[in-house]
Image: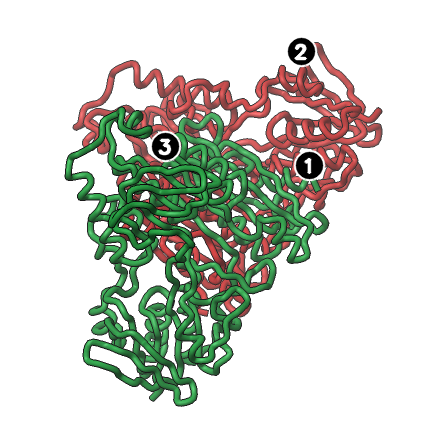
Chain colours: A green, B red
Amino acid sequence: MSTFVVIGGDAAGMSAASKAKRDDPDLDVVVFEKGEWVSYGACGLPYYVKGEIQDIESLVSVTPEEFREERDIDLRTGHEVVAVDPEDRTVTARGPDGEVVQPYDDLLFATGAAAVTPPIDGLDREGVYTLGSMSDGKELREYVSRARSEGDLRQPDEGPACQFLGTCNGPVGVVGGGYIGVEMAEALAANDFEVHLFQRGDRVLKSFSEATSETVLDHLDEQDVLVHLGASVEALAGDDRVEAVVTSEERVPVDMVLVGTGVDPRTDLAEAAGVELGETGAIAADGYRETNLPDVYAAGDCAEATHVVTGEPAYVPLALTANRHGRAIGQTVAGTPTEGGGVAGTAAIKAFEMEAARTGILDHDAARDAGFDPITETITAKSRAGYYPEGGSVQVTMTVDRPSGQVLGGSLVSEYGEGAVHRSHALVGAVTEGVAVDEFSNYDLAYAPPFNTTWDPVLTAAKVVDGTR
Amino acid sequence: MSTFVVIGGDAAGMSAASKAKRDDPDLDVVVFEKGEWVSYGACGLPYYVKGEIQDIESLVSVTPEEFREERDIDLRTGHEVVAVDPEDRTVTARGPDGEVVQPYDDLLFATGAAAVTPPIDGLDREGVYTLGSMSDGKELREYVSRARSEGDLRQPDEGPACQFLGTCNGPVGVVGGGYIGVEMAEALAANDFEVHLFQRGDRVLKSFSEATSETVLDHLDEQDVLVHLGASVEALAGDDRVEAVVTSEERVPVDMVLVGTGVDPRTDLAEAAGVELGETGAIAADGYRETNLPDVYAAGDCAEATHVVTGEPAYVPLALTANRHGRAIGQTVAGTPTEGGGVAGTAAIKAFEMEAARTGILDHDAARDAGFDPITETITAKSRAGYYPEGGSVQVTMTVDRPSGQVLGGSLVSEYGEGAVHRSHALVGAVTEGVAVDEFSNYDLAYAPPFNTTWDPVLTAAKVVDGTR
């Protein structure tokens, strides 16, 4: 009987464990998870903090009991793996009853990622939060609920956002203008906080196109988020408790700060065991997600993957890849070698009343590094037939290789509900298959007046960028 | 100076005329249109009849005056072309001032399609409508408005739907359960008519998957449309005015009937000129949309096109293809030979509070004829993260070739707004590029909780059908 040991009980780990056990019920599957939560939807935390999701347990797709009882997986929560010995093929875990040594035949590192610690003074002050775990989410929700219920709302003359809101909570600071920063700005603003968002560079959502960033920035302004661009945050000042965000330019008083400046892969354990990291700093793995050590796999936010456009390693720690790679490893371990597929760097976000998605390579330097000669065009078009009673607009950016026309990347933004995100599916396919933009512009996409114009905006974008080649 | 003559002033004709003139301003572009309306969105007519669009003029994207004055196109409305002489390169048109003979260098047949005349007695009775033209739309809207304003609503005991509606108009009959039939059922039901829909076969929307048809049928039931399946309509009975729909099984009293049983290509003029038709009965054309006659092109609802999956001719008279082929011809005529691209048979529909789309080959006989060994699976999945406060479900059918895994077709249905139609974009790409389903299932599609589950339903469908190969 063979044993599959998984380190880390979130998306990648539990997908692998479940799939391996389902495909090969004779396999012993042991999962070590240092916390108490497994298989939870971290992507849902902003909506829990916002108050749209009442019960944090609902973010858990499968409970530990279900894994143990229904799926027959030996899930050991509260167990932190402290060492891996690839010679002896054992892992050592520390749990409530002391250390256990567990032999393995196949091993998966699914250790995830940790919030980046930016070089800012005062990160340890009270009132400074990150949003990487379920307990982070709980703490933040408690803060938000408390601030709302205390009833000491400020008056219209007590802060810029309060002028619009009538009364408001806060002010609060969000450091970082990526997914977490923007989603948390929404969550906090929805709870009547005056939100200051600090972004180091000159735009929010910098992995998206410049046009998308601009559109979302305008929308954040409309929603009374106070965005501080080019803000180099130096300190979170205060005594015990944070009282202000201090940048090189200004000092903004705040009651609370959420730091969302990205994540770093958790690789210490793997490195100590002799697992090689890639050039991105995350664990390197081949198409089957196997590391340099035989029968040792890596998936999820601790690992890098191959970019479908460049063919080079990329670190894009997102949920679908974790699930997909975990599932492929489970299938491999159960006897059917399965490749996990590459990443296109696809991402989606709801930002207040807008939605946006991006995929592929948009950055011209990155495209040139990969040997392309990129050109980019952006169009804005109606999201439905002009005469249809509902509708808004969709802005589409496409980046293509000038000589070949190969679609390299796309970025879309629309009002929420007007389809920027689902429309991006078309571009993911084109990016993945390396389709030329003139061929793409001839795609027979679905059309009916309640859903688009005769030429869907993605086709219009393709025609326009093709016309400039 | 060269002259480009276009016969027919709707989507294909005006796209070609506009593109040709824009790319080569020295070209003389002459368009003959027998009616008064040009470049109108026929797809919007059901929403005009429904009353959601107040002004029928809003369906016109560019007016005749704009074509003449801003685009410098010699547009002659009220001119019916009665003969084409390909030897002399002339067309003869009959207009308000008699006959004109117009020489051409390049010629486009964009004569469109006409409503099929099914073998039913009484089609000429008063109160029997089709929906092929703007004037059809006006007449229907007038009927609906009149019926509503006359105020002689029937009472709850006067008809089955009236029981649900309280009071209602009608009863009215819709013959045909395709796009027009279903869209018109919605338009009429929204105006409180008791609607009887008669469909010859055993399901509505028969170009979609059986699962989609079933789901839409259930929804029509919920919406109190009285669907008569397997109904062979023999006569529309009455004196001057229609009084009943008579099938082989029953006699259903109605005040009005809408016949929507598909369209046939208008090919008489082309045939008379020696233009060859294809096996579908529509005008045959090559990749550049050129017919057997040199410099004579065909596009839009009068012409067939090449199916991207089978490589065989197909007759799929829809708006995007007309626009795309027209545009390509305009570009070709202006000096840059441009292929128009194939068709995937993609279509979308809103049906009351649901939306559906289909693409590619779903029918197993058709797939086998094209040399494939088809298998089909259908899944139903949540349209957004389970914990997200909004959301519904998406049902996805995928048909693939068993040995190769090639994606042949897809069909999707969801609640309106839950993204079946925009999600179909992903499947159109896969169908067009001949992507294998296992590769497709590894696509890095956009994910965020407000838009889908971590595995978008199209990926789940791909995994499931791949698992049965």
Determine the image quadrant of residue B247. Answer: top left
Tell me which chain the residue with mark 1 is part of. Answer: B
Determine the image quadrant of residue B24. Answer: top right
- Name the residue type under label 3: Gln
**Can you give x and y, in whole percent of width and height, for residue A77 in the image?**
24, 71
Q: What residue is disc 1 on?
A: B298
- Name the residue type under label 2: Pro
Residue B89 or residue A426, whichever sits in front: A426
- Name the residue type under label 1: Ala
Q: What residue is disc 3 on?
A: A223
Q: Which mark is residue B96?
A: 2
**Can you give x and y, in whole percent of width and height, for residue A272 in the image?**
42, 78
Q: Work out whether mark 2 precedes mark 1 in sequence or the reverse, and give the earlier one.
A: 2
Question: What crowding class fits label 3: few (fewer than 14 Cα within 10 Å), some (14-19), or many (20 or more)?
Answer: some
Tell me which chain the residue with mark 3 is part of. Answer: A
Examine the rendered structure and indicate whether residue B451 appears above or below residue B76: below
Q: Quadrant of the N terminus of chain A?
A: bottom left
Are both tags, 2 and 3, on one chain?
no
Q: Residue furthest front?
A: A239
Examine the rendered structure and indicate whether residue A358 appears above or below residue B164: below
**Mark-to-mark CA distance, 2 and 1:** 26 Å
Q: Quadrant of the C terminus of chain A?
A: top right
**Mark-to-mark CA distance, 1 and 3:** 51 Å
What secondary structure is marked by label 2?
loop
